[in-house]
Structures are given as C-alpha cells and as structure tokens.
Image (cartoon, coloured by chain):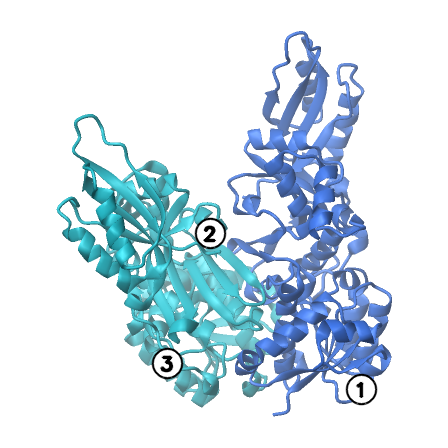
Chain colours: A blue, B cyan
Amino acid sequence: MKPIQVGLLGAGVVAGGVVQVLQRNRAEIQRRAGRGIEVAAVAARDVAKARATLGSEVVLTDDFDALVRRPDIDVVVEVIGGTTRARELVLAAIAAGKPVVTANKALLAVHGTEIFAAARERGVAVGFEAAVAGGIPIIKALREGLTANRINWIAGIINGTTNFILSEMRSKGLDFGTVLKEAQRLGYAETDPTFDIEGIDAAHKATIMSAIAFGTPVQFEHAYIEGITKLQAADIRYAEQLGYRIKLLGITKRREDAQGIELRVHPTLIPGTRLIANVEGAMNAVVVQGDAVGSTLYYGKGAGAEPTASAVVADLVDVTRLITADPDHRVPHLAFHPDAVAATPILPIEQVVTAFYLRLQVADKAGVLANITRILADHAISIDAVLQRESAEGESQTDLIILTHDTLEGKMNAALAQMQALPTVLAPIVRIRKEELS
Amino acid sequence: MKPIQVGLLGAGVVAGGVVQVLQRNRAEIQRRAGRGIEVAAVAARDVAKARATLGSEVVLTDDFDALVRRPDIDVVVEVIGGTTRARELVLAAIAAGKPVVTANKALLAVHGTEIFAAARERGVAVGFEAAVAGGIPIIKALREGLTANRINWIAGIINGTTNFILSEMRSKGLDFGTVLKEAQRLGYAETDPTFDIEGIDAAHKATIMSAIAFGTPVQFEHAYIEGITKLQAADIRYAEQLGYRIKLLGITKRREDAQGIELRVHPTLIPGTRLIANVEGAMNAVVVQGDAVGSTLYYGKGAGAEPTASAVVADLVDVTRLITADPDHRVPHLAFHPDAVAATPILPIEQVVTAFYLRLQVADKAGVLANITRILADHAISIDAVLQRESAEGESQTDLIILTHDTLEGKMNAALAQMQALPTVLAPIVRIRKEELS
C-alpha cells in the first residue's frame, strides 16, 4: 500500500523533530501502522534556512496555500505556531478534505470550536496530542484510556519553563528574577518569556484538557490566569517548612454544587509527599482524578523537538488508520460526541474553592493574631495551621503564616481586604492557593 | 442505535466493578462512545451468590458456553481468571466471531500467541488494557501513544501487594514475614500470596508489555523471575543510607549488543530521587523509555474493582467503535502488525546487564576488603561505592556493602562464587540488582 503522504507546514524545531523521527524509526512505525508514513513536502518561509535545518532529502516549498491543497497530500501537519496564519491554513486543509495534525495549543484553545466544527462538517480528523504536555500521551489517556470515568478534576504541571524556574528557586533559594535570567541563558525560557511566566501557555493547555474532560466547548476566554512573576523565595521556603511545594498548576474541576467548572492557572501549594510535588526541572506531569480509576498521573517531557514529534507522529499513525475507516465511529475530537457537548459554565474565580496560604508581615504586638483570626472566623474561613516566625531581639515586626481549609475565593477576598486594612498589618498580604490533590 | 450487548463471564469483584461503572456512568460513556453499552447477561458458577453481589437488575445464567455463543451478544468480557476454563471460553467467543475484553494477565502471558492468532484469523478484537497495571492506560500508551518511538526499555512497579509490603518494610523497619501477615489482615495480600510475592504476577504483566514494546511474541517461559521473600530489612536500610529504594520491578529492555531482549522481575535498587522510587503502598507505576519521547511515567491504582473496570470499559468503548469499522486498520493487538512480529530472543539471565548491591558479612580483619575487590577486578567488575559498618568494640565481624557498576550477571555469578568461598566471608552474600533508570 502506498505510504501516507504528509504535507508539513513549518520548518522550525518541531518540524525538524518530525522529519527526524519519521526517518529514523521508519521501519518501526510501519510495523505498527501497517503502512508507511512519508513527508512529501515541507512549506517554509525561508527555504534556504529550512534546507540547512532539515537536510537535503526533504522537498521544500514556500507556498503554504498550495501545499495544503495538493491532491497527493493525505494529511497536513501544522507546526508554524501562532493563531492567525495557522488558523487560515488549518481551515484551508480541512476545507480541502485533509486530516490535520497540529501541535498548536494557542490555536485550539482560542479557535478550537470553529476548527472542530469545520472538521466535523467535512468528516476529517484533527489530531492534537502534541498540543498538551508534549510527548506525554495525555489527550489519548483522557479521551480513550479513561473514557469509562466521570472525570472529577485534572491538575497539571504543563509548562516546563515555569517548573524549571520554581525548581531552581526552591533548590537554590534564589529569587524569581535571578532564576529567570539563568533560564534564559540555558534556553529554558524565551527572550520574551511572557506566555510562559504569566501562565498563558499553561492556560491554553488547561483549556483543552477541560473541554475533553467535561464535554464542554473550549473556553479560554473564561480561564483565570495568574503567573509566577510575583512569587517570592521566602514563600517557597515557608511552604517547605510546612511540608509543601509550590508549583504552577493548570487546574480544571467539576463543581456539582455550583453547576459549573473551575478552570484556572496559578501558583499552588501541594503536599510534598504527592508524586507531582516531586516533578522537578522542565518536566511536565498531569494528575487526572476519575470516579472509577481514582487518581492517575502521567509524566514526561512537555516540550522539545523529539518529544513533541513523538506526539505528532502518534497522531499521524492514528490518522493513517482512520483514513480508510468509518468517520462516524472515530474517537470524537473532544472525547464526547459533538451533539452531546454540554453547556456547563466555567465558574468565575470568586466561586472557585481552594485552601489558602497567607503570609502577613505584622507588628509584633499582643492581639494581632486574635484580630486576624477573628476576621477569618467572621467569613467562616477555618484555619488549618499557623506558623509565626520568632522575632529577633528588638525587632518590632514578624511574619505570620496561616494555612486555611477550603473556602470560596470570594470570601477570602473579602477577608483579605479587612485584614489588609488593619494597622498592625504592615505590608501587602501574600496569598497562594493550596491543593491537597488527594 | 441499539446499545452494544455485553456478555460478562464471571461474577467476582471485577465483574461487580464493570456492572457498577457501566450503570453509574451510562450517560457519560454514551456521550463519548456515541452508543450505549449494556450488560445483557452475566455467567456465574453460583447464581445465587452472584445475585447478592451484582444486584437484582442483572440477568444471570450458569451456562458460560451458551452465553459466549448467544447471537444477541456483541462482545464477551472475561473476568473469571485462571488459564484453563478462561482459555476455552475466550477461544469459543472468538470462534463465534465475538470480540473479547479480558483482564486476565496469566491467560495472555501464557496463551497470548494462540489467542491473538485465533482473533486475527476470525477478524475480531481482543482488548486487554485491564491485564496490566489495572486502571492505568499503559497498553494504550505503549501501543498508540508512543507508537512513534523505538522503545528502549520499560520498568514498572506492577504488583501492588509487593509494593505495599516493601513500603511497609521500609517505613516501619519491619521484616518480610511480619509485614506479609499485616498485608493479609488488611486484604492487600491473598491467603496464598505466592503469585504476588514470588513475582509471577509481575512477570505475567512484564511479558505482555515486552511483546508490545518490541514486537515479539509473548514469551513468559523465558522470563527470569525472583520475588521478594528473601529480602531483609537490613538491606532496605542500607540501600536508603546509600540514597536508594528497593522496589520489585518488572523490567524489559532491548539489548542491541546481544541481539536480544531482557525480560526479568526481581527486587531492584533505584535512586531515591527518581519519581518511581517514591511510589508507595499498593500503587503501580510504569516508566517507558522511548528514543523520541525520552522517559515517561504512568501512575495509578493497579488493582481493585473499579480501577480494573475503568480499563475494561475503556476497551468496551474501543470495541464499540471497531465493530463497524475496517478490521485491517485496527490497532494491532500487540502494537505491531502480526506479519511484522520479530523473532528477537529473550536473553537468559546470565546475559542480563545490571549494577549490583552486595552485602557481605565479613571477618573484621586486615586484607578482607583487598581480597574481595581483587576478585571483582579479576572479573572486570568495577566498584561504584563501598560502605563498611564500623564494628563495635570487641566484635569480630562486620557488614561490607558494595555497589558495583553495570556488569553481566554471568560475571557476577562467577565472582560471587569465589567471594563466597573466602574463609573471611561468614554468611551467604546478599545480592540485589540496581538500576539507575536514567
């Protein structure tokens, strides 16, 4: 049988990985897929540069639009990134009746509803395993492996840059700015790291997992997003003394009581004994809690040329199998059949329930703790633990750390405003959310 | 569309889980599968007892043979266990043209080649996600998610009973016999725990993963199997001092240099910083090393009614999709297409390469260490670390711990025989294999 012909859009790092893996493991992949998979042509903005990156065996073109329409192309792989040109080309490929494989989380988080609808109408598949957690087959696990479960929540370290920074801040006791510079020097962070450190990249991925887990449309616009730029080394240290690690988590959770879904990215305290708390450096890990299976965890490299290519090629093999099979019996793009998608709303952050870590810089006077705990009690927020740093001789202020039990964020905001107004609270209160992940 | 009709063979704990999950998550599963899935009838040896376990809504029969042939049954689920009756019934179902889903690792490890050949001939699918690591979708990850990779090795904690025992031995400093009794009392170990503690259950699962990873037939008869019954608390303690944990691992590894495959189950030292070293209690975890993706890890419950049912029902959803689709384009049972299966041999244990932990009870005399290290050097076995317990005042013997670098097991056996013959070695030498899993 004639090998599947791939049209590759983009000639960057991931494209190089795809070409490399398909060449090196050609025999192995054919033994599994039952059919060969070949890159027919690569579209690149700078053909000369692409030639240098991808080698002499690859056929190159600078006409992206022509490539997605070429009749001999069986499937289009989009690895150019961005949401404008990528959207046009993916929709053009679908319109031409071609299945698409993409590693583009931003594209799907923002334009997923439009793209999946177009694909469904045209009867073609869109693979996006590489869009979340790189080489970890988390989309397949959620969509197929855990299909028997009612998913309760997902929590993931889904951005390697920020996990590298947090790991370094903890192990070396350094502050955010210093570690960011080091990460940029080592290539773990971009020159403009905004998408990573502000949590936007993680929110794209959390948005996609949320839709798959709960059978809802992709709703990036309702995600709550808080990055790691304001995290201080002192809080990482205190958290550790209390038995916790701080990780940037993407979290999505079914909230029966509020008939909605939580979708949020923010720094989070998690117990140090949890496996995911021990995921260090640029690695990714996702915990999925299903009602039948309990908690399962998936761990691996979340980025890089070959880990991403691993996911792209897995999708290509799935597409190879699907091309001759019955479209009605495919795995639905977002796990649930499109006519069974639910309208459950994403909850605003004020309705989200978490525990909290609070650090207050307070005057070292009698009655300070009583005033603060009174405010918490007034808002029905109960306290899990209190840690007060012993003040040095002659020092007039100290740090007060409070761990609370679960509460509504809205209540905590009200309590924080009152605490902040106390004359004995001397600096802005630091507030980090805490999850037990049990 | 008419719901898929399931014939369930067996009415034990897992059968109960399958009935429960299909009932409770009926709507959720149908939204994903695009079609309902119903248990049409359950075959049980003791119908009255099954009625009590499974409730009044289930149709029961004691005629297993009739159930697998009933024309209205679309798919047969085998959860009776064992390798005799289960084999007959699975083959009968296949002969009747029915897809089969089984949780039976022993059956597939021993009779897999026969069963998959029969299924292929008849054009039906056999699902067995539940046979390895319970609810963790590791078969799907290996067969589909990592399909782009040349798999280098797999190492897994794939038996919850033994991991529970090892976790308790370590955390409480107790010996094997004491913890086994506790595990039996808590229901973590069977009354006859042989299959678990001797490593047989883990070897069944490692055998299945080995075949899928390397595209070879299932070869349980060539697996090297060593359980945990001889492990002593002292060695767990020493390992910890050296920064290691001892886990019962199922390991399978491609060995280019020996044109073969390692397939083995034995207690293993692994660095305490590895994520898998921190998998405690009855949990399972599998690390897969692929050439493109690097190391990925999959963690969750490896046993229990609902975790196992989670995997069984995921297979039922896959079968539901397959029933109307083209058999030639299915995912191959063992990941590789049957005509592409390789004949790579499983290596005998003497040709296996690992590092070693050795504990020698030695006379506290000059020259003892020199004699021992001389023997290792003669066999070209190099030493990674030596730890010698300081002997107490007046004591004439001490413990000598040696960590070696990687070596052939055959060489180590020869060196051990010579060391054991030294008059200064006072007791049988303890030898535990060590893996860096890096």
Picture residue at 61% right of the left edge, 53% below the top: A284
> Which of B428/B69 is in front?
B428
Q: Which residue is mark 1?
A: A70
Q: Is residue A364 above or below residue B176?
A: above
Q: Chain of mark 3?
A: B
Q: CA distance from mark 2 to mark 1?
A: 47 Å
Q: Is residue A122 above or below residue B303?
A: below
Badge nearest the viewer, 2 or 3: 2
> Which of B69/B115 is in front?
B115
What's the mark number on residue B16? none
Q: Which residue is mark 3?
A: B113
Kind of element beneath mark 1: loop
Kind of element beneath mark 3: helix
**Residue B195 visible:** yes
Q: Is residue B378 above or below residue B117?
A: above
Picture residue at 31% right of the left edge, 59% below the top: B380
Kind of element beneath mark 2: helix
Measured as percent of width and height from the top left, residue B200 is found at 30, 63
Q: Chain of mark 2?
A: B
Q: Are marks 2 and 3 on the same chain?
A: yes
Q: Which residue is mark 2?
A: B276
**Residue A262 visible:** no
Q: Amino acid at mark 2?
A: Ile
Measured as percent of width and height from the top left, residue B331 is found at 54, 78
Measured as percent of width and height from the top left, residue B284 is found at 44, 55
Q: Earlier in the sequence, mark 2 or mark 3?
A: 3
Measured as percent of width and height from the top left, residue A297 is found at 54, 54
